[in-house]
Image: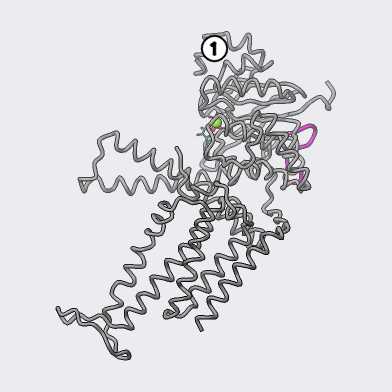
Amino acid sequence: MNHAFLDAHATLDSPLHRLDARLKTVFALCFVVVVVSTPAQAYCAFAGYTVLLLSALVLSRLPVGFVLKRLALVLPFVGAAAIFIPFLPSETVGGGYSLGWGGLAVSRSGMLVFWNILVKALLGAFSVLLLTSTTPFPQLLLGMARLRVPRVLIMITSFAYRYIFVLVDEAQRMARARDSRCYSHRWLWQAPVIGQMIAMLFLRSYERAERVYLAMLARGFDGSLPAEKPGTLAARDCVCACGVSVVVVALRLCAL
Amino acid sequence: MTADAVAIQVTGLSYSYPDGSKALQEVSFQVKRGERVGFVGANGAGKSTLLLHLNGILQGKGVTIVGMAVTKANLKSVRQKVGLVFQNPDDQLFCPTVFEDIAFGLRNLRIPEDEVGRRVRESLRTVGLEGFEKRSAFHLSVGQKKRIALATVLAMQCDILVLDEPTSNLDPRGRREIAALLEQLGGTQVIATHDLALVRKLCSRVIVLREGGIVADGEPRTILNDEAFLRAHDLS
Ligand SMILES: Nc1ncnc2c1ncn2[C@@H]1O[C@H](COP(=O)(O)OP(=O)(O)O)[C@@H](O)[C@H]1O
Ligand SMILES: [Mg+2]
């Protein structure tokens, strides 16, 4: 079975794909912080950020449809959190619009809060999306290791990435075996089957974890993990990161 | 026979799992250096349990590897001598890339990084999967996974190879490839399997296990051609 749902386009080749994983990680995180700290009324700054990300998207040669689809996944979550905010009564700021039914009114401060959440969530998701879909997962982990993220955390993440596929496979096989024996979701008395399947998946994962550990022991694993060497950054990558950082900081400053 | 010529010496080994099931009872045998021995037996006969003892994953009394008793103090040297390939490659290949998987054992031995890279490439070439370093194990076929699992152990340059069902879940071509690979590798090999054809082809000696004990030990030609015997021990 094929599961490339995590980093489907990470092995394309583009200037963005070739950039050092460490730089990309740090940059994406800083970018999110800068965006979140920008005041909501700084429309120019947001426009600037968007142009920046869009140019990165063009550079990355990622399929636009793919990126839009992934971004759209964020909307329901933001929407659920923010959809009622514009309708909150506002005592502090005057000038709302009455919608004329049921006493419902849109307040300007409410709109601003809504815009604030929406634009920041989208820009943040966009930048992280660019990071993860231009960096193969193993390289992302290596980047994290070189940034001195504790090895144990990296091991856990890497196990999760490695075995999520095995788990999905196992779950799919179980579901198929269940359905092939005329299971339908219609009857309440069949509900315990789901519980049993989850218990079974847990047991199998638990036993697999034990076998994996034995296989690690067999190759001399003694509980300590050799640290990753930090490796040097290419000068070209640094210059590029500095350049873009200056632009971002300038955008943020002009919003003051 | 000098002690030097003995790769594996097992004397009166018994083992029960914590739940009380007796997996091995009074097992004794000797494997010479350079010998290729097949362990056969029905499911649950105790093959896997026995193999786990050879690498010190399970530690019982009476197991000696090239003159070294398998004890806690000797574990590191024992594991450097004995490479264990597990039945299910998904248990053995747990890293995001093939390179990391093969490098894992080498890094545990604190081998310098440039030597690690060299050995990874070399072992991949041996198993016929050159250039697979950056691939992820989960996208490979079962046959490829099995060969990578073998490469993770080959890279450690162990004297003794111990393989648990190396041909299970493989199609005929995959079985043929593994057999050819093992034949070409040579050295001391211990192979647990249901695949009697593999034993006939590769092994100079076969040991038959049943319910945790040895019921036959000898040449495959005589033992594996005894139809009545095979049927009596659920092997055919
Ligand atoms: N983790 C375990 N816990 C309890 N009993 C086990 C465990 N693994 C194996 N056994 C039991 O030990 C016996 C030998 O099993 P095993 O060595 O796996 O046989 P084989 O590899 O020949 O199929 C079987 O009866 C099996 O049920
Ligand atoms: Mg077994």
Q: Residue at x 71, y 58 (%)?
A: A234
Give the total number of marks visible in the rendering.
Answer: 1
Q: Secondary structure at mark 1?
A: helix
**Picture quadrant where residue A24 is located:** bottom right
Asked if residue B54 lies in the magenta stretch, the reply is no
Question: Pointer 1 indicates a residue of which chain?
Answer: B
* Residue receiving disc 1: B229
Asked if residue B65 lies in the magenta stretch, the reply is yes
- Image position of A144 (left or right of A2): right
Between B63 and B235, the residue placed more toward the observer is B235
The image shows residue A31, relative to residue B168, as above or below, that is below
| Residue at the limit of the structure toward the left, as seen here | A101
Neighbor class of circle 1 (other Cα within 10 Å; few <14, some 14-19, many 20+) is some
Residue A77 horizontal/vertical position (percent): 36, 65
Span highlighted in magenta in the image: B64-74
Q: Residue at x 28, y 48 (%)?
A: A192
The image shows residue B199, relative to residue B121, as above or below, that is above
- Image position of A137 (left or right of B33): left
Residue A21 horizontal/vertical position (percent): 61, 57
Residue A20 horizontal/vertical position (percent): 64, 57
